[in-house]
Image (cartoon, rainbow, N blue to C red):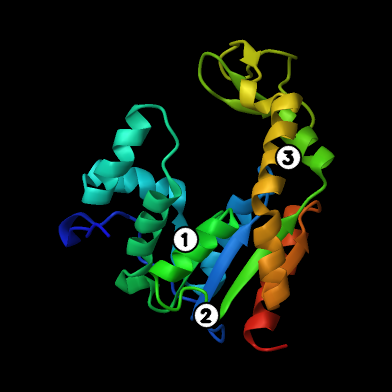
Amino acid sequence: MAAVKKAKAPCSAKPAPRAKAGVRAAAKLILLGPPGAGKGTQAEALVREFGVPHISTGDILRAAVKAGTPVGRKAKAYMDRGELVPDSIVVEIVSERLRQPDCSRGWLLDGFPRSLAQAEALEGSVEGAGDGARVVYLRVNPEAVVERLSGRRLCRNCGAGYHVRFMPPSKEGRCDKCGGELYQRDDDKPATIRTRLETYGRQTAELIERYRSRGILLEIAGDGEVQGVREAVLGAVRRSLSGG
């Protein structure tokens, strides 16, 4: 496995926040959910509550490439060709991150692993990575996700974001800030979203079942209001860590 230079660690993340008083800080958490499930919002709440570093594969991959670490250079070669970075390299980058000092009391893996093969490779690479872990799975209605994502609009001129239902512009099709034309990204079209959801379901089916059979899967309905989902997520994790 390629070593990561200490002077150029593959993650420039800020130190993990201090856990709230009375809350157990040592927590290994994996956050899973399909596109549009609200993982980013819930990740912020978990990081604040348990004082662990937030590890997003996209962020640490970009950081490794920018830092020019050996594994980052491997990843860049694929990215420059427009190819997906192989699981072996992603696992290597995540493994290096989990070995850093600020992860000694726990961590939050956001959206990774996404397949059974990735999970097995990670557990084989980092000793104890799966020991005591809890997996938060945000379960959502696919059509609710389609509605949420397909309603997004962006301004071609200034990049301001809107939603046709939840945050519509004052004038349909026009930006409130600059008057520019609003458009829908190809990734936000209903057919594309449904394809992404189906792909995610196929990729994660065996993984979800593995975590369920181990008794570490915390399934949370992610279709409700943000605050309600947040309370359900934090409550489930607290009870699980305390043995309740």
Instruction: Give the alpha-carbon distance from disc 2 to disc 1, as whole Å.
Output: 18 Å
Residue 192: x %, y % from top left: 69, 27
Q: Earlier in the sequence, mark 1 or mark 3?
A: 1
User: In the image, is 207 to the left or to the right of 168?
Assistant: left
Residue 106: x %, y % from top left: 46, 75
Residue denoted by label 2: 131
Residue 76: x %, y % from top left: 30, 37
Residue 198: x %, y % from top left: 73, 40
Which residue type does callout 1 highlight? His
Q: Nearer the viewer, residue 179 or 227?
A: 227
In the rendered image, the quadrant that contains the N terminus is bottom left
Instruction: Kindly identify which numbered label has been placed on residue 103.
Output: none
Residue ID at (22%, 49%): 70
Residue 235 shows in this picture? no
Q: Is residue 101 above or below residue 92?
A: below
In the rendered image, the quadrant that contains the C terminus is bottom right
Q: Nearer the viewer, mark 1 or mark 3?
A: 3
Q: Nearer the viewer, mark 2 or mark 1?
A: 2
Within the image, what quadrant is residue 14 found in?
bottom left
Q: Nearer the viewer, residue 190 or 76?
A: 76
Within the image, what quadrant is residue 103 found in?
bottom left
Q: SS for tag 1?
A: strand
Label 1 crowding class (10 Å Cα cut-off): few <14, some 14-19, many 20+?
many
Instruction: Give the alpha-carbon distance from disc 2 to disc 3, as whole Å.
Output: 30 Å
Q: SS for tag 2?
A: loop
User: In the image, is 49 to the left or to the right of 228?
Assistant: left
Instruction: Kindly identify which numbered label has been placed on residue 54.
Output: 1
Which residue type does callout 3 highlight? Glu
Residue denoted by label 3: 198
Q: Earlier in the sequence, mark 2 or mark 1?
A: 1
Label 3 crowding class (10 Å Cα cut-off): few <14, some 14-19, many 20+?
few
Number of numbered discs on residues: 3
